[in-house]
Image (cartoon, rainbow, N blue to C red):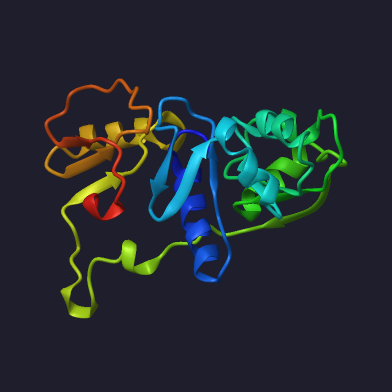
Protein backbone atom coordinates (compact mmCIF):
# COMPACT_ATOMS: atom_id res chain seq x y z
CA UNK A 1 0.00 0.00 0.00
CA UNK A 2 1.16 3.56 -0.75
CA UNK A 3 0.20 6.69 1.18
CA UNK A 4 -3.51 7.04 2.00
CA UNK A 5 -5.54 8.21 -1.00
CA UNK A 6 -8.75 7.25 -2.77
CA UNK A 7 -7.25 4.04 -4.14
CA UNK A 8 -6.02 3.13 -0.66
CA UNK A 9 -9.48 3.41 0.90
CA UNK A 10 -11.10 1.43 -1.92
CA UNK A 11 -8.61 -1.36 -1.36
CA UNK A 12 -9.22 -1.29 2.40
CA UNK A 13 -12.90 -1.90 1.76
CA UNK A 14 -12.12 -4.63 -0.78
CA UNK A 15 -9.85 -6.28 1.78
CA UNK A 16 -12.56 -6.24 4.43
CA UNK A 17 -15.07 -7.70 1.98
CA UNK A 18 -12.61 -10.53 1.32
CA UNK A 19 -12.17 -11.03 5.07
CA UNK A 20 -15.94 -11.33 5.47
CA UNK A 21 -15.86 -14.18 2.95
CA UNK A 22 -13.23 -16.09 4.91
CA UNK A 23 -10.04 -14.94 3.20
CA UNK A 24 -6.91 -13.80 5.04
CA UNK A 25 -5.67 -10.34 4.04
CA UNK A 26 -2.44 -8.59 4.96
CA UNK A 27 -1.11 -5.18 3.90
CA UNK A 28 2.54 -4.73 3.06
CA UNK A 29 3.16 -0.98 3.34
CA UNK A 30 5.83 0.95 1.43
CA UNK A 31 5.37 4.42 2.95
CA UNK A 32 8.03 5.06 5.57
CA UNK A 33 6.21 7.78 7.55
CA UNK A 34 3.68 5.30 8.97
CA UNK A 35 4.19 2.83 11.86
CA UNK A 36 6.28 -0.20 10.97
CA UNK A 37 3.41 -2.53 11.82
CA UNK A 38 -0.03 -2.59 13.38
CA UNK A 39 -3.73 -3.06 12.56
CA UNK A 40 -5.85 -0.64 10.52
CA UNK A 41 -9.64 -1.11 10.37
CA UNK A 42 -9.20 -4.72 11.36
CA UNK A 43 -6.50 -5.47 8.77
CA UNK A 44 -2.95 -6.29 9.93
CA UNK A 45 -0.11 -4.46 8.19
CA UNK A 46 3.66 -4.15 8.27
CA UNK A 47 6.36 -2.44 6.30
CA UNK A 48 7.19 -4.63 3.31
CA UNK A 49 10.72 -5.16 4.64
CA UNK A 50 9.17 -6.92 7.65
CA UNK A 51 6.45 -8.77 5.76
CA UNK A 52 8.45 -11.44 3.93
CA UNK A 53 6.73 -14.36 5.66
CA UNK A 54 3.24 -13.00 4.90
CA UNK A 55 4.14 -12.34 1.26
CA UNK A 56 5.58 -15.84 0.91
CA UNK A 57 2.33 -17.37 2.26
CA UNK A 58 0.09 -15.33 -0.03
CA UNK A 59 -1.83 -16.94 -2.88
CA UNK A 60 -2.05 -13.63 -4.73
CA UNK A 61 -0.69 -10.08 -4.45
CA UNK A 62 -2.60 -6.89 -5.24
CA UNK A 63 -1.35 -3.33 -5.69
CA UNK A 64 -2.48 0.08 -6.91
CA UNK A 65 -0.60 0.79 -10.14
CA UNK A 66 0.75 4.20 -9.22
CA UNK A 67 3.23 5.03 -7.83
CA UNK A 68 4.43 1.69 -6.53
CA UNK A 69 3.96 -0.92 -9.27
CA UNK A 70 7.68 -0.97 -10.20
CA UNK A 71 8.62 -1.55 -6.55
CA UNK A 72 6.01 -4.29 -6.13
CA UNK A 73 7.33 -6.04 -9.22
CA UNK A 74 10.84 -5.79 -7.81
CA UNK A 75 9.70 -7.31 -4.51
CA UNK A 76 7.79 -10.04 -6.36
CA UNK A 77 10.92 -11.19 -8.19
CA UNK A 78 11.68 -13.16 -5.02
CA UNK A 79 8.21 -14.68 -4.68
CA UNK A 80 6.70 -14.83 -8.21
CA UNK A 81 3.09 -14.52 -7.02
CA UNK A 82 0.18 -13.74 -9.36
CA UNK A 83 -0.30 -9.98 -9.24
CA UNK A 84 -3.53 -7.97 -9.50
CA UNK A 85 -2.88 -4.35 -10.56
CA UNK A 86 -5.66 -1.88 -9.73
CA UNK A 87 -5.92 1.24 -11.91
CA UNK A 88 -8.06 4.01 -10.44
CA UNK A 89 -7.27 6.51 -13.21
CA UNK A 90 -5.65 6.47 -16.63
CA UNK A 91 -2.41 8.37 -16.11
CA UNK A 92 1.09 6.88 -15.74
CA UNK A 93 0.78 4.25 -18.45
CA UNK A 94 4.52 3.57 -18.77
CA UNK A 95 4.53 0.62 -16.39
CA UNK A 96 1.31 -0.80 -17.82
CA UNK A 97 2.72 -0.82 -21.34
CA UNK A 98 6.05 -2.20 -20.12
CA UNK A 99 6.84 -4.82 -17.50
CA UNK A 100 10.48 -4.83 -16.43
CA UNK A 101 11.16 -7.74 -14.11
CA UNK A 102 13.48 -10.60 -13.37
CA UNK A 103 11.04 -13.44 -12.87
CA UNK A 104 7.85 -14.80 -14.33
CA UNK A 105 4.29 -14.46 -13.02
CA UNK A 106 0.84 -13.67 -14.37
CA UNK A 107 -0.55 -10.15 -13.97
CA UNK A 108 -4.20 -9.09 -13.98
CA UNK A 109 -5.29 -5.54 -14.79
CA UNK A 110 -8.36 -4.22 -12.99
CA UNK A 111 -9.57 -0.80 -14.17
CA UNK A 112 -12.02 1.33 -12.22
CA UNK A 113 -14.36 2.31 -15.09
CA UNK A 114 -15.19 1.72 -18.73
CA UNK A 115 -14.14 5.30 -19.42
CA UNK A 116 -10.64 4.70 -18.02
CA UNK A 117 -10.36 1.39 -19.84
CA UNK A 118 -11.18 3.01 -23.20
CA UNK A 119 -8.72 5.83 -22.49
CA UNK A 120 -5.94 3.38 -21.61
CA UNK A 121 -6.50 1.06 -24.58
CA UNK A 122 -6.63 4.01 -26.99
CA UNK A 123 -3.17 5.07 -25.82
CA UNK A 124 -1.23 1.82 -25.23
CA UNK A 125 -1.22 -1.92 -25.54
CA UNK A 126 -0.80 -3.54 -22.08
CA UNK A 127 2.37 -5.53 -21.56
CA UNK A 128 2.27 -9.28 -22.37
CA UNK A 129 2.55 -10.02 -18.64
CA UNK A 130 -1.13 -9.05 -18.31
CA UNK A 131 -3.11 -12.21 -19.00
CA UNK A 132 -6.53 -10.74 -18.15
CA UNK A 133 -8.13 -7.30 -17.97
CA UNK A 134 -11.51 -6.27 -16.60
CA UNK A 135 -13.46 -3.33 -15.19
CA UNK A 136 -14.17 -3.41 -11.46
CA UNK A 137 -16.33 -1.09 -9.40
CA UNK A 138 -15.00 0.08 -6.02
CA UNK A 139 -17.09 -1.37 -3.23
CA UNK A 140 -18.52 0.45 -0.24
CA UNK A 141 -19.67 -0.91 3.11
CA UNK A 142 -23.09 0.68 3.32
CA UNK A 143 -23.34 1.19 7.08
CA UNK A 144 -20.04 3.12 7.02
CA UNK A 145 -21.22 5.75 4.55
CA UNK A 146 -24.98 5.88 5.14
CA UNK A 147 -26.32 8.65 7.37
CA UNK A 148 -30.08 8.81 7.03
CA UNK A 149 -33.06 6.52 6.61
CA UNK A 150 -36.20 7.37 4.65
CA UNK A 151 -37.89 10.65 5.65
CA UNK A 152 -34.96 11.70 7.84
CA UNK A 153 -32.86 12.43 4.78
CA UNK A 154 -31.63 16.02 4.51
CA UNK A 155 -30.85 18.14 1.47
CA UNK A 156 -27.60 19.32 3.07
CA UNK A 157 -26.13 22.79 3.39
CA UNK A 158 -23.01 22.90 1.21
CA UNK A 159 -21.88 22.36 -2.36
CA UNK A 160 -19.02 19.95 -1.73
CA UNK A 161 -15.87 18.81 -3.50
CA UNK A 162 -13.95 15.96 -1.90
CA UNK A 163 -10.21 15.63 -2.63
CA UNK A 164 -10.21 19.13 -4.07
CA UNK A 165 -7.22 19.03 -6.39
CA UNK A 166 -6.81 20.52 -9.86
CA UNK A 167 -7.61 17.28 -11.70
CA UNK A 168 -10.91 16.90 -9.82
CA UNK A 169 -12.18 20.43 -10.30
CA UNK A 170 -10.66 22.75 -7.71
CA UNK A 171 -10.80 25.64 -10.15
CA UNK A 172 -14.47 24.98 -10.86
CA UNK A 173 -15.30 24.96 -7.13
CA UNK A 174 -13.56 28.31 -6.62
CA UNK A 175 -15.23 29.88 -9.66
CA UNK A 176 -18.66 28.70 -8.53
CA UNK A 177 -18.07 30.13 -5.07
CA UNK A 178 -17.15 33.48 -6.64
CA UNK A 179 -20.25 33.46 -8.85
CA UNK A 180 -22.60 32.49 -6.02
CA UNK A 181 -21.37 34.35 -2.91
CA UNK A 182 -24.54 33.58 -0.92
CA UNK A 183 -24.14 29.80 -1.26
CA UNK A 184 -22.00 27.73 1.13
CA UNK A 185 -19.20 25.53 -0.24
CA UNK A 186 -17.15 22.83 1.45
CA UNK A 187 -13.79 21.68 0.09
CA UNK A 188 -11.99 18.62 1.46
CA UNK A 189 -8.26 19.00 0.95
CA UNK A 190 -6.29 16.32 -0.90
CA UNK A 191 -4.43 13.81 1.24
CA UNK A 192 -1.18 15.67 0.54
CA UNK A 193 -2.88 18.94 1.59
CA UNK A 194 -0.83 21.13 -0.78
CA UNK A 195 -3.29 23.44 -2.47
CA UNK A 196 -3.30 27.18 -2.97
CA UNK A 197 -6.68 28.87 -3.26
CA UNK A 198 -7.99 32.39 -2.66
CA UNK A 199 -9.58 32.98 0.73
CA UNK A 200 -13.31 33.23 0.12
CA UNK A 201 -15.80 33.69 2.97
CA UNK A 202 -18.24 31.13 1.55
CA UNK A 203 -15.72 28.25 1.21
CA UNK A 204 -14.98 26.12 4.27
CA UNK A 205 -11.95 23.81 4.09
CA UNK A 206 -11.55 20.45 5.81
CA UNK A 207 -8.49 18.22 6.04
CA UNK A 208 -8.61 14.61 4.85
CA UNK A 209 -11.22 12.62 6.82
CA UNK A 210 -10.80 8.96 7.63
CA UNK A 211 -14.60 8.68 8.01
CA UNK A 212 -16.55 10.15 5.07
CA UNK A 213 -19.56 10.66 7.34
CA UNK A 214 -17.67 13.56 8.93
CA UNK A 215 -17.90 15.30 5.56
CA UNK A 216 -21.52 14.33 4.88
**Extreme bottom residue here?**
150
Residue 79: give x, y in percent of width and height: 76, 40
Please count the marks in the image: 0
Residue 164: give x, y in percent of width and height: 35, 35
Residue situated in front as seen by the camera: 8 or 147: 8
Residue situated in front as seen by the camera: 173 or 130: 130
Q: Residue at x 66, y 57 (%)?
A: 135
Does the image show residue 86? no
Q: Residue at x 67, y 34 (%)?
A: 72
Residue 49: give x, y in percent of width and height: 58, 30
Locate residue 96: give its quadrant: top right
Residue 150: give x, y in percent of width and height: 23, 79
Looking at the image, is 194 positioned above or below residue 21? above
For this view, does 185 lie left or right of residue 108?
left
Locate residue 203: give its quadrant: top left
Q: Pick the quarter of the image with the C terminus.
A: bottom left
Q: Residue at x 18, y 66 (%)?
A: 154
For this view, does 143 lie left or right of residue 95?
left
Residue situated in front as seen by the camera: 44 or 211: 44
For this view, does 165 lie left or right of residue 149?
right
Amino acid sequence: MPDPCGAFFHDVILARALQARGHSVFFAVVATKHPRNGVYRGIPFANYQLAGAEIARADILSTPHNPILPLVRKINEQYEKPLVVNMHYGEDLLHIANCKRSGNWAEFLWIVSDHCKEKILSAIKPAPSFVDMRVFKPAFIENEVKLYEGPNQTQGECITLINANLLKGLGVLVELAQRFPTRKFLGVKPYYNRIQVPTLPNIEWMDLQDDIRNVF
